[in-house]
Amino acid sequence: MEPRPTRTDIPPWVIVPEDLKDPEVFQVQTRLLEALFGPKGSRIPNIEQVSKTMLELKPLEASDLTEVMVYGNYLYKLRTRWMLQSMAERIRQRVERGMIKLEEAMQSLELGQPSNEDTGTPTQT
């Protein structure tokens, strides 16, 4: 038997107990959660209402991942999982691109390399 969600505020569009069986589960990097779900998960109720699903987040121990469980009608679960995974991947790519641009900017300004004065190494002439 599958473990039931621990939430007590099950949305009215989720049929108990049928929709609480066999959730769609995927993992997201914890650092992306705020961009995906808003500060302190403020967008979760809206996502649930629009997608007609129920979401539950579970941080994984000894990992930088969070498990996202999607409950609801079979097709709604699949669609919501696909949508959230796509959004998380796009956010991850944008963060990565931003880090690459930052590294390039630092290299162009030579901020990433210590100068001879900083290291105490004499300059050769």
Image (cartoon, grey):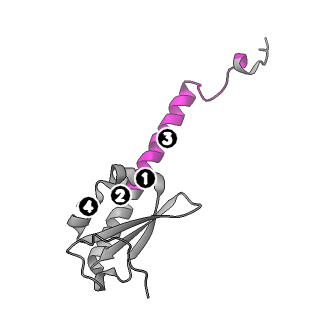
Whichever of labels 3 and 1 marks the residue nearer the N terminus, that label is 1
Residue located beneath label 3 in the image: 99
Whichever of labels 1 and 4 marks the residue nearer the N terminus, that label is 1
Marks 4/3: CA–CA distance = 31 Å
How crowded is the residue under tag 4: few (<14 C-alpha within 10 Å), some, or many (20+)?
Answer: some
Residue located beneath label 2 in the image: 87
Residue located beneath label 4 in the image: 45
Marks 2/3: CA–CA distance = 19 Å
Q: Residue at (27%, 82%) from the top-left corner?
A: 16
Relative to 87, say whether 72 is above or below: below
Q: Is residue 84 left or right of residue 61?
A: left
| Part of the protein shown in magenta | 89-117
The C terminus is located in which quarter? top right
Q: Position of residue 21 (x, y in %)?
A: 36, 83
Viewer-proximal residue, 23 or 42?
Answer: 42
Q: Quadrant of residue 75?
A: bottom left
